[in-house]
Amino acid sequence: MRGARPERALDAAIRSAVRFGSGARVCVACSGGPDSVALASLLDRLARDDGYDLVLAHVNHGVRAGAAQDECVVLSVGARLGRRVLVARPHLERDDEATLRDARYAMLAALAREGGAQFVATAHTAEDQTETVLLALFRGTGLAGLAGIPPRRPLGEGIEVVRPVLRLTHAELATELRRSGLPYAIDPSNAERRYRSRTAT
């Protein structure tokens, strides 16, 4: 990513992973964290160049003290980019990782339908992919687990999950974050052991 215009390399990496057609609508899953804000910034730029539409989607689980702040960050990012933000607040009986993940994807599918989007883009990175495979190995998974996070999969009727930055690192996304100057939040639960399993489906 060296050079005077590192964003060009990032744009090329995104387009090589997934290219949305003109007139498509993409729903960016934005937690307010640095990776998802960087993805929103990247796709906002590409959407303007390639002629597709973009909406931001935020799922506020409400399981920690900073949840309201994260939502405010996403609303601010949407305002700065001039993009619509859709918010869901699921009611959960449990807050374990599997429950949160299932609720998150269910809400993202609902928000995509609300926003008329055909795609939900998530900010899973190369580090997330590596962690998922290693966790699967430690748990004695089969070949399916070793495949890691799929770059795309169906989420619901007419909706597909895509992961445009699955081959990019946190450091590479940080380049876009610095360039954009957009606000972001740091989630302290990322350091908690019970939330360490970041297996995506």
Image (tube, rainbow, N blue to C red):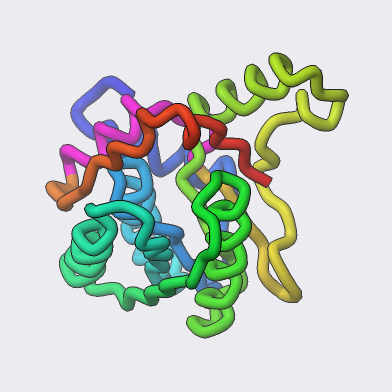
- Asked which quadrant contains residue 200, the reply is top right
Secondary structure character of the magenta stretch overall: helix
User: In which quadrant is the N terminus drawn?
Assistant: top left
Residue at figure coordinates x 19%, y 28% from the top left: 4
Side (left or right) of 189 relative to 76: right
Residue at figure coordinates x 54%, y 74% from the top left: 112
Side (left or right) of 66 relative to 36: left
Can residue 25 be seen from the camera position used here? Answer: yes
Q: In this view, does 116 lie above or below 70?
A: below
Side (left or right) of 159 relative to 180: right
Residue at figure coordinates x 65%, y 43% from the top left: 151
Q: Nearer the viewer, residue 191 or 185?
A: 191
Q: Give the range drawn in magenta.
A: 165-179
Residue at figure coordinates x 18%, y 48% from the top left: 180
Q: In this view, does 197 lie above or below 118?
A: above
Q: Which of 58 and 126 is in front in this view?
A: 58
x and y percentages locating residue 63 in the rendered image: 37, 56
x and y percentages locating residue 62 in the rendered image: 36, 62
